[in-house]
Image: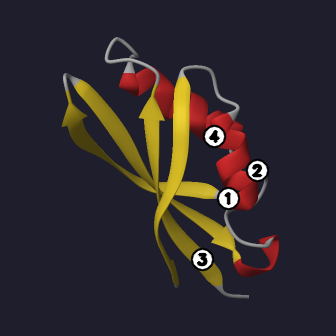
Amino acid sequence: MSKVAAQLKVMPESPEVDLDDLHERLENALPEGAKISNVERDDVAFGLTALLPTVIVPDDAGGTEAVEEAFAGVEDVESVEVENVGRL
C-alpha cells in the first residue's frame, strides 16, 4: 500500500497561541492511520507564525480531507490549507 505525504499550512488565530501546544493538539486530532512526520514554522507577518506539518496518510484514506477537517476543528486554528502533496 502506498502512502501520501502532504504539507499543510496551519494558521493559528493569533500570535499569542503557544505553537508547541498547538502542535501537540494537532497530533492528538489526527485520524487513525495518519501521522505527522515533520513540522516546520513559517513567520507570516506581525508576529504570526504558521505551522507547516508534513502529514503521512495511507493512499486508500481518500486524500487529505479528513486531516484537514480534523485540524480545522482544533481550538486556536484559524485556517488549514494544503501546500504540497506527493506519493511516497
Which quadrant is the N terminus positioned in? bottom right
Pointer 4 residue = 71
Residue shown at 49% from the left, 26% from the top? 22
Disc 2 and disc 1 in contact, CB within 8 angstroms:
yes
Of the residues shown, which amino acid type is indicated by label 2? Answer: Pro
Q: Nearer the viewer, residue 2 or 13?
A: 13
Q: Is residue 12 left or right of residue 47?
A: right
Position of 10 relative to 53 (above/below): above
Is 46 positioned to the left or the right of 16 in the image?
Answer: left
Location of mark 1 (residue): 34
Using the image, tell me which numbered label, if any, was put on residue 31: 2
Mark 4 against mark 3, which lies toward the viewer? 4
User: Disc 1 to disc 4, how far (Cα)?
Assistant: 12 Å
Answer with the quarter of the image where residue 79 lies.
top right
Callout 2 crowding tier (Cα within 10 Å): few <14, some 14–19, many ≥20? some
Q: Is residue 32 above or below residue 77?
A: below
Q: CA distance from mark 4 to mark 3?
A: 17 Å
Q: Please state which of residues 50 and 56 is positioned toward the viewer in this rendering.
A: 50
**What's the residue type where badge 1 is placed?**
Ala
First in sequence, mark 4 or 3: give its number. 3
In the picture, the disc for residue 18 is none
Which quadrant of the structure image shows residue 57?
A: bottom right
Mark 1, residues whose alpha carbon is within 10 Å: few (<14), some, or many (≥20)? many
Residue at 38% across / 25% down in the picture? 19
Q: Residue at x 60, y 56 (%)?
A: 35
Residue 26: image location, x then y, percent: 58, 36
Q: Secondary structure at mark 2?
A: loop
Instruction: Look at label 3 and name its amino acid.
Output: Val
**10 Å neighbourhood of mark 4: few (<14), some, or many (≥20)?**
many
**At 62% from the left edge and 20% from the top edge, which residue is drawn?**
75
Task: Give the numbered dot on residue 4.
Answer: 3
Disc 2 from disc 4: Cα separation: 10 Å
